[in-house]
Amino acid sequence: MRRALAMVMLFAAGAVHGWAYYHFVRYVGPAGFTQTVPEKFDLAALPNGTVSFFVAEDAAALLSDPGAFPAVLNLVREACQTWNAAPTSALRVAFGGLFRPGSPQTTPGAEIYFEELDPLTLGVGGPTSRGTPVAGPGGLFVPITRSVVRLNQNLSLWSGPSFAEAFYLTVAHELGHALGLQHTFTAATMSTEVTRSTSLARALDDDDLAGISALYPAAGFAEKTGTITGRVVYEDGSPVHLASVVAIRPSGSAVSALTDLEGRYRIEGVPPGTYQIYVHPLPSSGRANAGLGDIVLPRDGQERQIEASSPFDTVFLSGNQTTRDHRLAAFFPVAPGKREENDTITVRRRSGYRFSPLTTYSFFGQTAVRPAIVNAAEASVRTVAAFSRGLAANNIPAAGLQLEFLGGTPLIAPNGVRAYNGEWLAVDLQPTSLFGASGVRHLVVSLGDDIYVRPNAVRLVSSDPPLVETLASNPDGSVTVRGRNLSAFTRFLFDGVRSTILSVDPESGIRLAPPPGIRGKQAVLTAVNPDGQNSAFLRTAQAGAVHSFTYDSGETGILQAVTPSIAAGAESMVEVTGIGVQFDAAVTTIGFGSSDVQVRRFWVTERNRLLANVWVAPEAALGPVTLTAVNGFRVLSQPAAVVIRPADPLAVTVSSTVVNAVPGQSGVFPGALVAVAGANLTEATVSIGGQSAEVVSAEARRLVVRVPLNLPVGPALLRVSSAQSSATVVVGIEPTPPEIVAVRGAAGEAVRAFRAGDSIVVEATGLVEPSGPVALPRLRVICGGIAHPVIELTPVAGEPGVARVHFVLSALVPAGAQVPLTIAVDGRTSQPALLTVLD
Amino acid sequence: MFCRTLVVACAALALPVSATTIARATLDELIEKSTSIVRGKVLRVYGVRNGGLVSTYVRVGVIERLKGPEAAEVEVVLPGGTAGGLIQKVSGVPQLVEGAEHVLFLWTGRSGRTRLLGLGQGVLDLGKGPAGESMVTRQAMDAYVVDPASGRAAEPEAVSLRYADFAARVKRVLASASRTEAK
């Protein structure tokens, strides 16, 4: 087989071919010219590009443990936030609270039901559509109308080291289906449960991010990541349909794609790096009449289901050949914004596929953790267990069985693969090969005439799991935790609900604010570390490792919307108050039970008061809607809290998306010129935070307004009024951006021009907060378009509010007489200072 | 030490298989966990839309009951399907075709609705063996075999059972379970 490598600019490629990732697709067009059409949400039909997930309100009564309902809602919220945080995806995902099944809605959304499912089925999910392709900016697609996730009402089915983690991962996985992703085989969240290796700490793997971003690409997605394309055929030249092609780094994650009818594949969203590539057939689902790999098979224009091609040898690419020996596999560099185009990969048909998905475990006492986690800092031999049907029988390993890690490390000890318990394998890892290693490692299993690659088979970490030794209540309602392997980076969950770290002290312990609760509620504390380990791992290995917290006060409270009505087709501020409530923005969600009434953002202004910007669809059902709030362990509902009134085409409307109107500047801060979008604005007057704001320019759909100078930082009401009507939304007033006062040499001397390598000191305001100088990761120094690492930030003695920023001029900065230098904090950017840079 | 730990822990491990997040069960576990087991013929398959939910209803004419209450017909509900102009896709749901004969492991909950136990895991195909005897086939767990000449999936012999042997196994497992309960 010949293989040529060509690097071409991504956007010079012309037509898009191949099936990126594993989406729900159909094929359209004649043979040889088929186009792969995915099912996805139409971003243009979603407010703010946001799809909301709602939980059916009858869930509380249906759950096997009704007391777990608030925790369940919080974990659903966490799963939504996980998908929402995908940085290269343009789709935003929100938890919208509770809804009443059957209520009319016109905006696409997603619904979660708890049902009586059989005791083997934990959950199912997928998109709902009308099946008709439409044209969009990225080509044809089938719009998802409403996705559905069904979860088993019997919560006792979720077990494992942490109920919260197991349930959360199931929800995150099913949400992925609802967003348009199918299964992959890379140990990501969208992989089947036996091979999944994500956790509460690392919820999405690279393949998940690539899958969602390929479907809903954000600006810059193609420029930040690479693409690998090619084709897979049999030896007779016929194309292989639904072959899985995987790009993998020996100590990093994998990204994959399936081949289409012509055998073409397109792996998008590959993080820059050096990869090996292998191709494997889809495994059996293990279930009668279900598609291979549990893939919903593509259909053609006649609604015929298109099956996967017959199995073939799994092979790595090696130069212009293929190989089963991973040690001979070639490495391919992937650069951002580039497409690496491979020549055709030729594979050999075989009569059957010998492997089943391989699962690995490590043991902490009697607690099995899957996949295996190994503390590489320990000097002793570490043993992991592995299970895959056919690798051992009757305590004897299969003939010809060989196990190795991709990239060669960690090493497996001599005679380190043993059969146990019938079909199980115990694998001993050589401790010397583990020293200093961290991250995931992939196992390659060989049975002589075929291989199987198990991505993320083992995660190497550098410490033991977190251990909670004591949990003590404090008079102020906080709790103090002491234990081992706990830090400021540990997440503390009470029955899966986040708490807030108030202070960290090596002597006295970590002080937490538990989420708002109800008197008598008992919640189990779980500590989750960034390395994927959690304190539940040690529940059987360490006596007293499980700790519960019992709330001695707290009521559900009463909810009330102060704003009586809001108009359809507009955005409005809604004020919500409560009696006996304790709003905590980190664990509070409010919603109105419909994707036609969406909460865009809210601010907790007082313990029992919040202000929300609420968007209402033009075609939303008129009349009263129910307000719900999930506030830690408190679930509140207020029927008929707000009335949706008809749209008034002559009334002033205003969007809460207020942006800085000055080119190159961002943020809404005192003194800033900001653009306000809306309707009927020509004669409008504006106030912000109760102060009159200067209207610099006014058009029917756009105002430019100056933010009053003395507004405090925080939420402020933006009120736009005409003679006949007015509209109010909330805007967040941000701190004033940094202002560059002076640019000097390293010793503070005046310098007229700089060269590469010179130390530069910039004096600027806006870099010191009441608590001290801003943390360096929040600071960005850009000179000549190049980001520069900050060496030091120090306040200037005797000049309140002024600080010095020290950096070294990069050789990448082009020479010039007017090279711009800016400083930004949290994205708020100073006006540029102009430097002279010499060659 | 590791060996003992492993043996103890293995017994407690559930192996959910997918996506659709489903716990994997052995044939004997399916026999035990099901509320009824029937050999039947698919009479009718139709979709029903209830608000945002689409379900597929499968009416099955019972030829033989191996476990559970007597009934001439059973109605099985599957998640997803096509109804009311909507197509609701769910990974891992088996397609049951009118006229086909299967052995079905069913589970009826408090609601009275009957579902396939473990979705596709709860379906066995019926066919004829080399001597014309009636056979039940459970698709191999995590392995499939293909006829290289035709490229079509073939039934893996290793997991085929004569129907008579299967029926006897059901009786044996149920008898064993009832003995355990009696203790």
Image (cartoon, rainbow, N blue to C red):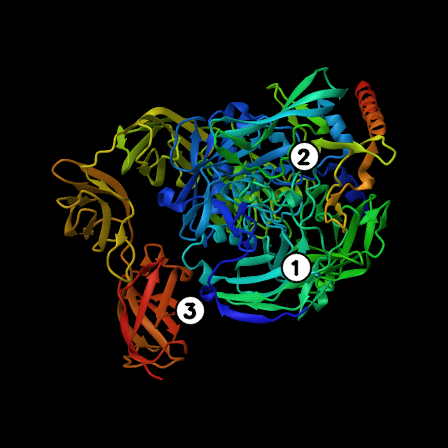
Q: Residues within 10 Å of mark 2 (few under 14, many from 20)?
A: many
Q: Nearer the viewer, residue A101 or A196?
A: A101
Q: Residue A125's x, y, as percent?
A: 55, 37
Q: Which residue is mark 1?
A: A233
* Disc number lying in front (1 or 3): 1
Examine the rendering and report whether any part of residue A375 can be seen: no
Are circles 1 and 2 on residues that touch, CB within 8 Å?
A: no
What is the chain letter for disc 2? B
Residue reaching furthest to the bottom: A839
Q: Which residue is mark 3?
A: A789
Q: Amino acid at mark 1?
A: Val
Q: Amino acid at mark 2?
A: Gly
The numbered mark at residue B120 is 2
Same chain shared by disc 1 and disc 3:
yes
Are circles 2 and 3 on residues that touch, CB within 8 Å?
A: no
A721 lies left or right of A366: left
Q: Nearer the viewer, residue A73 or B133?
A: B133
Work out whether mark 1 precedes mark 3 in sequence or the reverse, and give the earlier one. Answer: 1
* Disc number lying in front (2 or 3): 2
Q: Residues within 10 Å of mark 3 (few under 14, many from 20)?
A: some
Helix, strand or loop status at disc 1: strand
Measured in 3D between alpha carbons, the distance from the residue under mark 1 to the one under mark 3, in whole angstroms, is: 48 Å
Helix, strand or loop status at disc 2: helix
Q: Residue A324's x, y, as percent?
A: 73, 62
A390 lies left or right of A287: right
Q: Residue at x 88, y 34 (%)?
A: B131
Q: Quadrant of residue A399?
A: bottom right
Q: Residue A632's x, y, as percent?
A: 46, 34
